[in-house]
Every structure is written in C-alpha cells, then in structure tokens.
Image: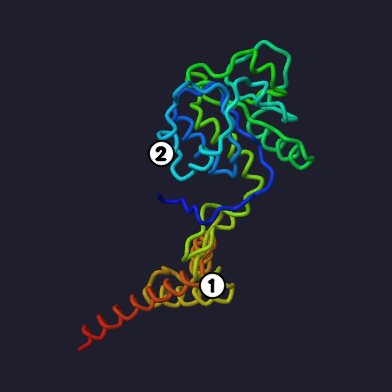
Amino acid sequence: MAGTDSTRKTYFGPAPSVVLVNPQLGENIGMAARAMANFGLFDLKLVDPRVGWDREKAVAAASGAHETVENSSVFKTLEEALHETHYVYATTARPRGMTKEVMTPEQAGLDMRARIKRGEKIALMFGRERYGLNNEEVSLADVIVTAPVNPAYASLNIAQAVLLMGYEWFRHEATSLGQATPELPALEGPGLQMPDTQPATKEQLYGFYDHLERELWEAGFFKTLEKRPGMMRNIRNIFARTALSEQEVSTLRGIISSLTRVHELRRQKRSE
C-alpha cells in the first residue's frame, strides 16, 4: 500500500488511548485502528463491542495496522475502560445541556500534549456509528471536543473522528511531513522544495538579468533607450517573485542562448 512501511515503526513515547464505545462493525474498528496508526496512537480500547464483530474484517480494514486491532482491549463497561485514566476527552457534535468545558480539536491537541508531558494518562472517547455517545457516557468525560463543521453534515464516522483527533495530537510531535523513501528523505516542512538544487545566489540572478537585457536589446524589445531601465525593473520583479533555483537560472540562460543562436543563423542565411 502506498505510504505504508511497517518496517519503519517508531515509538513516539506516551500517547492517548482511543476508546470506542459500543462499536458495531469490524470494518469500522479496523479503519479507526488505521487512523490511529497514521498519527502514532496504538492503545485501542473497545467498550461493549457488538457480539460477533468480525475480527478478520477489522484486520483487513486496518490496512497494515492489524497489531492495533489484535492487541486491543475489550471492556464490558465504560467505567472499567477508564479506570486508569486521569483525563478523558469526549468527542461529540451535539450540545448536551450540561455544564462542561468544550474544546476544538486544535485546543484539545495542545491540552493533550501538556497533560501527557505531566505524566497523565488520557483517553479519547468516541461513540457509536449511528448516534455517538449518550449523555451518561459524556458525563464521565472531563471535557467535550467538538469540531467546527458544516451544521448540515455535522456527524463524522468513527474513523474520520479518530483521524481528526489523532492529527491534532500528532502534529505537535511530527518532525517532518509525509514519508521518507529510499531515494529521498521526508520533507522537513511546508514551503518551496528544491531537490538536487538550491536557491540561486544574487550573483547568478544578476548575471541572468544582464544576459537577458543584452539579448532583449539586440532583439529590439526596448522601443526607446529611455524606457529600457523601467522595463528591466519590471522584468526583474517578475523573476524575483518566483524564487528561482540555481538549476532554473541555468535553464533560463540556456533558453536565451538557444533563441539567440536561432536568430543569428537566420540573419546569416538572409545575408548569404
């Protein structure tokens, strides 16, 4: 599977547990496990799963995160699953009419980091496929996490909800983007990427501008001598905004030289 390399497993330190309350389908359990693995979460607790849920389908849906499914813990009650936990985040899209703090996933991600750093054991709680958590279950949590979503489609499926919370947890831990390959390391961060090259120096840029200006003058691009400085400023500004690399400057100069040779050959033919 693209983007999956089970030989590169890394332990990222203590992390939240994921608690699925009364899940019904093995496929959803597996997809939640896969979402957990994407973001360094591996402790899966199943509370009162449907009798006879299909473990084989769960493993298949986990798409490589089968160990999370196979090592999951099963509990009869939610209270039992939360016994060793210090702080619990209940995910829900609906108002509950109870006095309880509400966080966004982003705020929860920062809060989780702080609590894990203090040595607390924390859990992310997710409800059933059809109607989520009930009020009694939410009351066992310390805080509610609700995402800003389209009110007409506010409900997330289990795997989506786990993925969202996992991302907010892990993005403060991640040191790179995506996945490394045998050919290239993982990206260090967002922004302009320049594999096999580097940003052009000012000397290289100035040389390119001088080269371009000479050839444009020879081609008659500048209508008058007076307009030449202003037109070149505009041209330089165009290229300055593109953050040219060394390779790109070299390519552009090669283009100019090729066009110049073509024009010279044509002039020679006309003069013969």
Q: x, y (%) of residue 247?
A: 47, 72
- Residue under label 2, please give it: 60
- Residue under label 1, please give it: 205
Depicted 50 relative to depicted 45: above or below: above
The answer to whether residue 144 is left or right of residue 66 is right
Residue at screen point 51% across, 34% down:
32
The answer to whether residue 43 is left or right of residue 259 is right
Residue at screen point 66% across, 41% down:
15
The quarter holding residue 122 reads top right
Q: x, y (%) of residue 231?
A: 49, 64
Q: x, y (%) of residue 66?
A: 48, 42
Mark 1 vs mark 2: in front? 2
Amino acid carrying mark 2 in the image? Ala
* Marking on residue 170: none
Residue at screen point 67% across, 23% down:
80
Task: Give the residue at the far bottom of this rendering.
Answer: 272
Graded by Cα atoms within 10 Å as few (under 14), some (14 to 19) or many (20 or more), the crowding at tag 2 reads some
Q: Relative to the observer, which residue lies in front, 266 or 205?
A: 205
Graded by Cα atoms within 10 Å as few (under 14), some (14 to 19) or many (20 or more), the crowding at tag 1 reads many
Q: Relative to the observer, which residue lies in front, 233 or 261?
A: 261
Amino acid carrying mark 1 in the image? Leu
The quarter holding residue 169 reads top right
Q: x, y (%) of residue 136?
A: 65, 13
Residue at screen point 50% across, 66% down:
195
The reply to whether dot 1 and dot 2 touch (C-beta < 8 Å) is no
Depicted 94 relative to depicted 229: above or below: above
Task: Give the residue at the far top of this rendering.
Answer: 97
Query: Under tag 2, what secondary structure?
Result: helix
Query: Under tag 1, what secondary structure?
Result: helix
> Which one is earlier in the sequence, the residue at label 1 or at label 2?
2
The answer to whether residue 220 is left or right of residue 170 is left
